[in-house]
Image: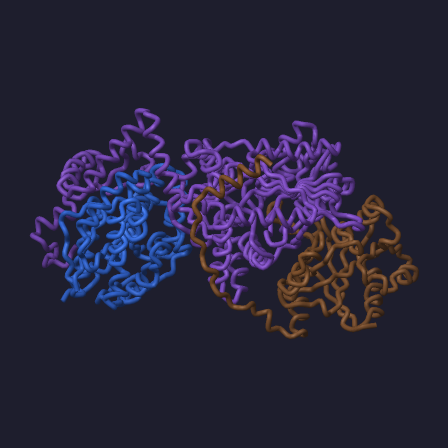
Chain colours: A purple, B blue, C brown
Amino acid sequence: MEAHTDRFKETARRELKNEMSQIFLSLLPPGFTILRQIGMSSFPDPVSAVDQARAIRAEVIERMPELLEEFEKNAVSKGATVLWARDAGEANNIILEIARKRSVTYVTKGKSMITEEIGLNEHLIKEGVDAFETDLGEVITQQLSLPPFHIVGPAINVPPEEISAVFLKKGIIKEPTTNPIELGKAVRVYLREKFRHLDMGIVGVNMAVAATGTIINVENEGNIRMTKSSPRTLVAVMSLEKVVPTMADAMHMVRILCRNCTGQKISSYVSMDTGPKKPGEIDGPEELFIVIVDNGRSEIFRDSKTREVLKCIRCGGCLNTCPVYSKIGGYPYGFAYSGPMGQVLNPLLLGIKETSDLYHACTLCGACKEICPAGVDHPSLLLIYRAREVSLKGKDGKALPFIEKTIATFVSLGMSRAWLWNLGAKIMRPVLHRLSHDGYIRNIPFGVQGWFTCRDLPAMPAKTFHEIWTERKHSPVTTSRKT
Amino acid sequence: MKVSLFIPCTVDIFMPEIGVAAYRLLSQLEAYPMYHQDQTCCGQPLFNAGYRDQAKRAARHFIEVFGNDEHIVSPSGSCISMVKHHYPELLSDEPSWCDRARELSERVYELSQFIVDVLGVTDVGASFDGKVTYHESCHILRALGVSDQPKKLIAGVAGAQYVELNNANACCGFGGEFAVGFPEISHALVKDKATNFLNTGADVLLLCEPGCLLNINGYLHRNHPGKRAMHLATFLAGSMKEA
Amino acid sequence: MHAREEILGRMKSAQPGKALIRPSTQPLSELSLSREQMIQRFTAELSTQTGVVHQASTREEAVKILTEIAAAEGLRSVIATGYNIYGMGLRAFGEANHITVNTLDDLPDREALREIAFTADAGITFADFAIAETGTVGIIFNRHQPRLASIAPPVHIAIIPIEGLYPVYEGAIEKVFSNADDIPSQFSFITGPSATGDIQAVQFKGMHGPLKMIVIFIMGQG
């Protein structure tokens, strides 16, 4: 997928003014959050259930290479072909070759974030293999060429009029309609033919169980089961971190994933494939290819400070609790991953320099970290990226960063010497006084204007606490009741 | 009991009355705090902006100033969180400083946390004839786990009618540099916070975080003059009968 | 082999992290359910997904229930699958009710299966497990149980011997996955009909999979 992370601010401004987006954002995240709470309360001890999930993901991080090898060994022993891809290009070419060798003219696709990340659809279509998204939300974003609004409901905000217009153009509907159910049913009919004659399907992987070599898919619509059942050839695409130690661990993570994702205790379908079909079986894939995609993750894994990003299970719980996301939706983040999980992952996939707004657009409120069932510490990661940005800036040698750094250094000197601190306050006071009226500053026309777009700042009082203390000779308590 | 007052930079520069209130409150409770005049700032603004080397200077200075104090108390959750949770990480490559930071982290307290948990006091002898509500600031709530303590102190105010704030634990949109760097999003968040406050009909919005206070009061002053938020310390000190 | 070595090599050169000790967990409350309670719980859970649950004391009674369902749903052709389906007398059921009943005996290959599965009014499949925890049906797919029969037709009727009822998922998982040499090519948990809410959060059933799900427990032998 093409990244537009540099358009964060302008897209955020646009989304803040978009009525439809704001309606959904006022309802969806809080709604999902409540559903998650209800779902989690069905555990006898929800806190320990989260602890258990965090421990499972921590073990995956600890043992990832050996778990991947174990998974591969077991999958291969059951007849799967496991292929490794270092980057997007390699993965896309592997999958294209599989299609070409079998003269496949089209594939159906289950919703898969890794395939969006690597731009698989675009690659296949460009090379003459039609790729049909089949998850209803993905069908819409594919038709409208939109990034996802929300990881679980990528097109949930799109006005039905827009859906109707593009469906009419593509012949999915014959008459315009804004009824969501009619639109959905039309997609059922449209894709049913595709499933029925399918030769090759592509799905993602929610969990790859090391102990058995099993791939697990979690879904509600049935498009993944269709894609795994109908064709002779099945390609399952997974990124490195999808691996999970045992089936028992996988079941716990299924419970956790579903509750944190949609509030469901379990999704409509959880299908678990171990190898291709066996001899004598009439459907299911004769060939199962599992493509394990790196695309920067082995490097992320090597960095002990950022490795925890790989714990993420893509539940979207963090999106629903993020104050920033709940005002701007998914589009501003400019890539396959939005919300806090996108803010911690995209900078590592796309580069620190390319994603500056992503790790600065955070109040560090910690709501994401608090609910994350996988144990990701988003605020700490964002602070690390900010620090990396600073150290990279220095190497650029550009003028503005140099000034910033000099100011920061000067400030730090003030923070380590009380006399300089107090002197700085004394110097700042008349400057701020000039900018204030009736005890308040309404604008400072350099550096910090952003503050003043909607709020004032109190003028600096006549004395700092330091000065009050000194003046009242070590005791700021007066005889008067008034403070 | 030896108590040392740690005054956040925002309080020192813009809202010293909060520091004075904290001092009065603790003195009233006979925990007469000392104040080290060579204190400055915990370094959080630099750390949050990514200037770790520079933030280290502030951290080392803080440890030097407060290192021998038994209890370090501050009317700010984010500052205490900085010292408690981020100093060891910040100084992780300087083992002796890191050890001192870790050791110090056991002795730092947010003000309401200290009054309720250490001094064991929930009634400071304050009274208030009116309605109050409370905003749960992010660091104090999630980083420090402090939520009951301010509410107990509010409940201890004779005559004060407590009204629950809708979405009390929603971020107010301050986030330090965030309010400057992403003004439209920050605006949307502080607007929600203000709306929820106004909807309670409370006379005052109480909170324990100076940063939130600057943000919310700045917004109220511009858009709803006459409505105000107040630091819990200022509120309690202003409403208590002195011995 | 080049990519594999590079990726794994890079990962193995990393310093290991700190694993968390697995915390002890409380057993799930469903584990203490009696059979009667499990049936109640299963029924309640599946009903919230719009699934319908019947209890038949014998296979004959199950066929009676099927007859009622067929009339209510206007079924004219069905696909019937699963090893145990043969003892059900479904051919007779079909003849008696003018319903075309296709089993795997009638379907020589994948194309024939797809033709029938995508045009049948219902899929009648035996199922191996029922999980009380969430009203979930568990099906092992193999040479007697094709995958498409339970996902393609608009109605899915699952016939489940009551011995297959377990309180939580782990009961089924242990049975299915514990013998490494005997893991099925696919095992699926099915909880209610196909569903979506992807357009304007308007929920509806029957997106790509069945619109309706019906479970018939067979309580005894015969």
Q: Is residue A415 left or right of residue B179?
A: left
Viewer-nearest residue: A313 or B140: A313
Viewport quadrant of the C terminus of chain A: bottom left
The relative height of residue A270 versus residue A148 in the rendered view (above or below) is below
Residue placed at 58% from the left, 31% from the top? A89
Q: Position of residue B118 (x, y in %)?
A: 25, 65
Residue C205, x across and y down, in percent? 69, 52
In the depicted structure, whether residue B159 falls above or below residue C180:
below
Q: Nearer the viewer, residue C142 or C123?
A: C142
Query: What residue is rendered at 59% in x and 58% in y?
Result: A251
Q: Is residue A170 visible?
A: yes
Q: Nearer the viewer, residue A474 or A87?
A: A87
Rendering coords of residue B10 (x, y %): 24, 46
Residue C168: x and y, percent?
62, 65
Q: Residue at x 14, y 38 (%)?
A: A423
User: As drawn, is C160 to the left or to the right of B208?
Assistant: right
Q: The N terminus of chain A is located in which quarter?
A: top right
Total marks placed: 0
Residue B225 can be seen in this image:
no
